[in-house]
Amino acid sequence: MSDQFQGIEPMVYQSKINVPYSWWAGDTATRFFVALRDEKKITATKCGACGKVFLPPRKVCPLCFTENAEWVNISDEGTVLTFSVARRQLAAIPQDRKVPVIWCLIKLDGADTAMLHYLDEIKPEDVTIGMRVKAVFSEKRKGTIRDISHFKPVK
Amino acid sequence: MDRAAIIGVGMTKVEKSKVRETFADMAWEAVNKALADAGMTIDDIDNVVTTSSDFWDGRTISCMAVGDASGAADKNVSCVEGDGTYGAFYGYTRALSGSYKTTLVTGHSKGSQCVSSLITNASFDPIYDRELGMDMITACAMQANAYMNRTGLRPEDMAMVSVKNHGNAFKNPLAQLPMNITVPDVIKSEMIADPLHKLDCSPVSDGCCAVIIAHESVATKFKQKPVWIRGLSFCTDSFFFGDRDLARSNALAEAANNAYKIAGIKDPKKEIDIVELYDAFTYQELLWLEEMGLADYGKAAKLLEAGKFNMDGPLPVNPSGGLLAGHPVIAAGLYRIAEVVMQLRGDAGEHQVKKAKTGLAHGVNGLCGQSHCVWILDKER
């Protein structure tokens, strides 16, 4: 608004926000990740009132507002509800994934909600909504969502 | 119920990089413009609500950094983290509470100072989703695919939104990115995340907006014509994508219906004259219009093609150029409110639309439109 600063070189301070942070996974996610890591099993919580099966599992059914007391095993196969394909190496993409990276929202058989993960072993052009896919587990599993390496098409 | 009105608005120019202004400098400009617009001094303001996001601002308690420049010294100041429409919602409830008469609401952010892909990645669940490396663009690409699959929408249909809004921006001196482009230009632009091309995505932007909300008892005390708040509502969908139907937005349908009900609007297609909505991506303008009942589901593109949403059409949508012509996150929804206010007052200048009695302003918070805030504003009380 005032021009008393006209012609002065604007200064820029380079910095970064880099704060270590530990997320306690909590009982529910811990149980899910232990089953994934130790048994290559995908598990979900089930609402005792409406019977809805939640993946990723959570402690509370948001619809009934009650605790999900029951655990069920879920198939490692499911259906692609939607997907996206990164063509630009966006900053959030992990170092070990190179474009094109395909993510999809997968409804696994036995679950009522869908989970996010990678889709691989397929060309982006061949991905379709409604296609059947199957989980591929990582060799080395550490108890994280990437204990599933990716999903691949069911032949 | 008591009524409240918007009696002053101030917007900085939306720019790619405001290297000469800090957050507080932007707030200073927007607040002074709003005060001048209202014919008020800072002493006439009895409380302040600032809207900002710590992650985007690169600091904690980011609201505190703009308080002084917003004239909040010795006043009751509070803050909202999220889109500016939510900050204004809070401001409105304060005006109705009986404790305050004049609320100054600001919203600011600078996309230019950070890496938006990393910031938006951080809104994913840290335990289940975040390390997969999605961000706002790849998430919205997923929503666009679901919506296209459900409705048969083609990339060319979405591209028309980009052509219209970048074109409208030529008439708005505050817009960042006026462009004279065609549908093939959009389709030929870089594919960032299928099906979203670069020109389907809003740009990274800096900006600050301020609005002044007054209780009815003082709404006509100052120089500016009040624009009356007739109805507003917000509603939020599930956090996890897999719990939602991404091809739809139930939260928006509900927010819009509530806002219409409060405003006494029976047929929004006939009663709304002008819309400023949150077009962070081209497909969103169409999907949001449909969920707000301003077009039938899957039919907005046809109406767009027929010119219905043009600046000189029967229902102008984003005559300012919208977010595609400049997207200061957080402030963006507040800009939508300010733009509708200018239109209803007849002060929008070159992008003024012809008939503007009742307007709709819309803001979004969260990935793939998790939460929506809908405002119905009116020239008449």
Image (spheres, grey):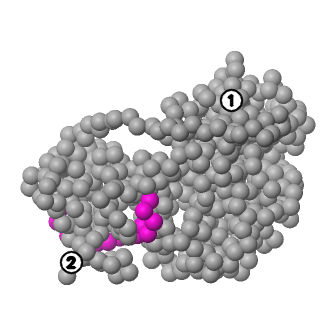
Pointer 2: what residue?
A154
Q: Secondary structure at mark 2?
A: loop
Q: Where's residue B364, x and y in %? A: 57, 52
Position of residue B344 in the picture relative to residue B204 (left or right): right
Give the residues in magenta: A72-90
- Residue A86 on the magenta span: yes
Same chain letter for marks 2 and 1: no
Within the image, what quadrant is residue B178 found in?
A: bottom right
Name which residue type carries label 2. Answer: Val
Nearest to the observer: residue B33 or residue A15: A15
Identify the subunit bearing mark 1. Answer: B
Rendering coords of residue B218 (x, y %):
83, 31
Q: Residue at x 33, y 56 (%)?
A: A95
Residue placed most toward the observer, B370 or B182:
B182
* Residue B48's disc number: 1
Query: In the orientation shown, which residue stands out farthest toward the right?
Result: B223
